[in-house]
Image (tube, rainbow, N blue to C red):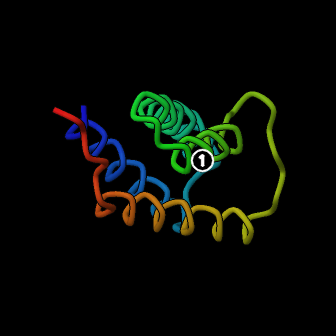
Amino acid sequence: MASKNKYVKIALAVLFLLCLADFPYGFYQLVRFIGSIGLGYLAFSAYQQENKVDLIVFGALALLFQPFAKITLGRELWNVIDVGASIYLIISLFKAKPKTNS
């Protein structure tokens, strides 16, 4: 599952950084939908791994990006959130993995 998480994190980071460009509004709606699903998946994965920090961060981001109850923050603030989320996703790729008792 860890390798699947890696691809989801990379894809989401790239997708969020693409939001800095000027696209039609439908693109941003698609990003919110894909982002909420991907971040929800990462939050569930963090829950299964008992990683409370990632669970909280990915869960909060999934709620923020959810497309059903639009959160109007303005383009500049959304750009900051997109960059921050991308940075966290990239950093989380390199965090030490929890040791398992085998």
Left or right of residue 93: residue 63: right
Q: Nearer the viewer, residue 67 or 45?
A: 45
Q: Residue at x 38, y 58 (%)?
A: 92
Left or right, 73 with reference to 33 = right
Image coordinates for residue 17, horizontal then vertical, percent: 46, 64
Q: Is residue 76 above or below residue 53?
A: below
> Residue 32: percent from the left, percent from the top?
60, 41
Which element carries disc 1, helix, strand or loop?
Answer: helix
Image coordinates of residue 67 in percent, x first then y, are 69, 33
Between 61 and 76, the residue placed more toward the observer is 61
Q: Left or right of 40: which side holds 6?
A: left
Kindly identify which residue carries mark 1. 28
Q: Quadrant of the N terminus?
A: top left
Relative placement, left or right, of 53 versus 74 is: left
Residue type at mark 1? Tyr
Residue 79 sits in quarter:
bottom right
